[in-house]
Image (cartoon, rainbow, N blue to C red):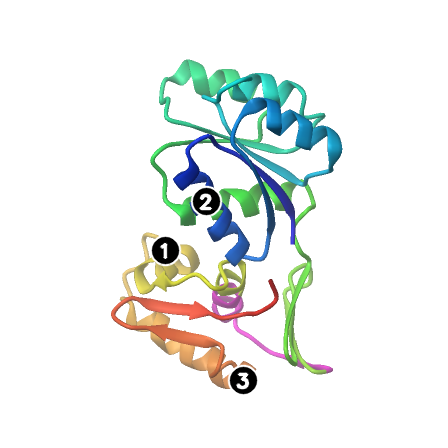
Amino acid sequence: MAEILIVEDELSINELIRRNLNLTGHRCTQAFDGVSAVKLLEDGKFDLLVLDIMLPGLDGYQVFERAAGTPTIFLTAKSELTDKLKGLAMGADDYLTKPFQMLELAARVEAVLRRTKKVETEFVLGDLKCDFDRHQVFLGERAVECTPKEYELLEVLIRNRNIALSREKLLDLVWGYEFDGGTRTVDVHIQRLRRKLRLEDHIKTVYKLGYRLESNDL
């Protein structure tokens, strides 16, 4: 779990980001203008800053200058290359142009947290433990052998827990865009994970879409 500060003046977007990042296990604080964001940064320590550029009070660049090295993903409606280059030149870790998909933002968040060593190193759900550093899975004290694709699928489900993922999205994230084996491959691997790791009650089938790993660790 990471402490994330979301700075976005559009209430609906701010709230949507908060809900989605909360679902994946992170704790979020919200700010809706630059001045409030700076005050929160001064009063607390955050693992990541999700920062809009166009803000009332102080803009995102000014907030970033006062962020004391906090890893940052810039959000902006601007798509001009100069704006992107300015943010990256200032030291931002990533840059996302609106509109964007929440799954893409979640993936960018996890990537930055992983690079900055702020990402969780293990996940526990009942008797199941997944050790991300060692790529090992345990049921109680017993190590469970998983194929590389079974492990990758499990980690994707964990990283995006409580979020419904389509079969196509799982196929892209685990097998890659060039894989042409079809979505039935996802179903087969899901069934294996359910049986092997006793996750029948946690990996839910989402009707006409795909799957969701349900966890109450939030």
Q: Quadrant of residue 97?
A: top left
Res 164 seen here:
yes
Give the residue at x 57% y 31%.
Answer: 93
Please state the total of marks drawn on the protein image.
Answer: 3
Residue 36 painted magenta = no
Q: Amino acid at mark 1?
A: Asp
Residue bearing mark 3 = 198
Residue 90 appears in the rendering: no
Earlier residue among tags 3 and 2: 2
Please tell me whether mark 1 sits on a helix, a strand or a loop.
Answer: helix
Identify which residue is drawn at 37% across, 26% down. 77
| 153 in the magenta segment | yes
Residue at the (64%, 41%) spot, across then down: 115
Residue drawn 55% across the image and 81% down it: 197
Q: Secondary structure at mark 3?
A: loop
Q: Amino acid at mark 2?
A: Glu
| In this view, the mark in front (3 or 2) | 2
Q: Earlier in the sequence, mark 1 or mark 2?
A: 2
* Residue 172 - label: 1
